[in-house]
Amino acid sequence: MKQLIAAVLLLMLGGALCLLPASNRLRASLGLASQALATLLVWSAVFPVMFGAPGQTLQLPWSYPMGALHFHLDALGAFFLSWSLPMTLLGGVYAVGYMRKYFDSPRHLGVHFGLLNMVSLSFILVYTGEHAVTFLLGWEIAALSAWLLVIWDYTNQKVRFAGFNYLVSTHVGLIFLVAAVMILYTHTQSWYLDDFGDWMRQNPGSVRNTVFLLLVTSFGLKAAFFPFHSWLPRAHAAAPAHVSALMSGVIHKAGLYALVHFLAISGRPDEWMGWFLLAFSATSAVVGGLYTTGQRDLKRLLGYSSTENVGIAGMGFGLGCLGLSWSQPALVVLGFGGGLLHVLNHAFFKCQLFYAAGCVYQAKQVVDIERLGGLFARMPVTALCFLIGGVAISALPPFNGFASEFLLYSGLLGQGSPSLGAQLVLVLAAAALAFVGALSVLSMTRAYGVVFLGSERDTSLAPSQEASAWMLAPMGIHAAGSVLLGVAPGLGFALVAAPVAQFLQAAPSPADVAALHAAAQTLNHVGIFCAVLAIVVLAVFWLRERLLPDRPLQSATWGCGYGAPHARMQYTGAGFSVDFITHFKNIVLMLKRQKAPRAYFPDDSYVVVDCVDAVERRLYAVIAQGDASASDISEKMHEDDPRLAFAAGLAAIVVIAALVVLANGALP
């Protein structure tokens, strides 16, 4: 743990140095240097734990009422720390290129890099903190740092609103988390998470069920599960690209970590908990996937796909809980192993996709799909990285998204369920997962085809050019990770094997370690298949270049026989998916704004189709109705009426008396 303490101190020092009265270049350099050194220190601590060394524990004395602060690095926390800090460092490297215009401006860029340091520091606190206060402290540091990073362009009203929306949502989740901690502290008289877990293992019942629901709600808000997701697309659309990437790929994975951690320390879950997680996550995956098919803002599309992918990971966790309750080690391995592997894979390809979207924005200053087109010719590296990420997020071979979802399919379609009815429900969940995969293929094909292929649609936009090396390097590293974890998924499973083994030890009967070896062997076969497929694809492209060297990959848009095709004759994003979305119009709300033509050759007519969030729209409608009702009631009341004060006081006394009776029973 000494390395982690040194990393925390180094990150704090680097964050402070970023505030020095120096040039923006020096501030950024100090921030990146401190993050790089902290990453090396964290790696030196976590890798031994991930590969068999015992966990590390640290206690720091503190005053009453908190007592000693307890930190513990186990395999699960080590797994999350192993990639969270280096990916945050890559986000800082990307920020050097993305924020280049601010380096010579009066704007204090050191604050931005200092906040990235605070994000890395929060990971260490959350993933090692076994004291409720230190855990909540890291949770809040991550939330506030992410909020300040989101509102970098605070002069824009839409950015401020998106930041406020995120801030309110994350603190609503904090309220649920604090409520769960208060209940557990009341029953344990302890602040330690291990004591919370011991109590929940020994006391199944209504209180434990209530705590479980509170925790799922809190962590669902943090990770942006449906229907707690409405803050996410706005925040991602408003934030700088590297901030969007880190929020989606890294920061909000803290919600999934906390969920898995509490499941690990709580012992054998009730069967209904597994079914609840499976249904809750499948709903999130399906609805998030549906909303990706109608977005015209590229970053909002990627934001909704995060709701889809955390749902996929959650389905694995639900399957793992069912395996624990049914004493089926194979389901435990496939569920938690597939879910954790998908968390890692999602971090790689989602950061990669957001970085590509940031390159597009830097070139064109817009991410409106309907205005973009033909970028492949001038931005080939960005286009290739987006293509790799799109294939990976669609769970298609040979990239990494296929491997993790293959494990989930193996568990859902396996033979571990105790009854025919349970097996039928798992098959339906597998069908939902397949449907989500089809939605991803549709949305990524739509985004890639409209943005990078065809011809340029809006000639008023700036000429496109490839991004700087500062932006391409992190994106390329993530793309290489997506490829490597696709052709060698055993490497990724080696990282999650130790955390999964923690759940096997929590099984009600001695766990069969052979289940771990079987899953690893399955992934090795998957890796061989993906490697062969990748070689075949590369061979086909090589042969094409050899045999048809003069034939371009990109040609003019097919004009249906028309002799003078125009760029506006191409498929639009809305036209690409409208036939599909029509079948789900009660879920995916599409708003059309149009101005009809008024002459034979109109120049100001238009049709604009936007996909709006049904949950957000309904929430604001309820708030508006409540505000109108409160205004109406206040108009009918008179502040100087003594009857109003008497009635309010009497109601308060009745409520207090009822709470006392419910808590302690009636007076003798």
Image (tube, helix red, strand yellow):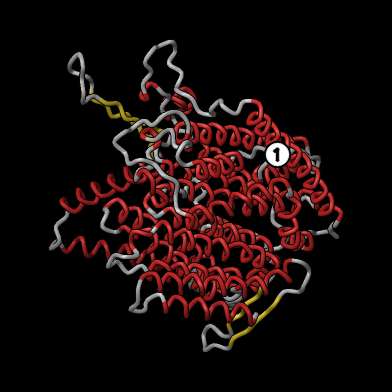
Of residues 658 and 468, the one nearer the viewer is 468
Q: Name which residue lies at 40% across and 12% down.
A: 562
Q: Name which residue lies at 49% across and 60% down.
A: 91
- 273 up-or-down from 578: above or below: below
As shown in the figure, which amino acid type bears the numbered disc 1? Ala
Left or right: 415 with respect to 95?
right
Q: Residues within 10 Å of mark 1 (few under 14, many from 20)?
A: some
The picture quadrant where one finds residue 510 is: bottom right
- 534 up-or-down from 359: above or below: above
- 365 up-or-down from 153: above or below: above
Of residues 496 and 529, the one nearer the viewer is 529
Left or right: 450 with respect to 212?
left
Q: Position of residue 592 (x, y in %)?
A: 32, 29
The picture quadrant where one finds residue 188 is: bottom right
The picture quadrant where one finds residue 459 is: top left
Q: Which residue is mark 1?
A: 534
Q: Secondary structure at mark 1?
A: helix
Q: Position of residue 560 (x, y in %)?
A: 44, 13
- 39 up-or-down from 339: above or below: below
Q: Position of residue 112 (x, y in %)?
A: 39, 66
Q: Position of residue 577 (x, y in %)?
A: 47, 27
> Is residue 235 visible to us here?
yes
> Is residue 422 visible to us here?
no
Of residues 60 and 191, the one nearer the viewer is 60
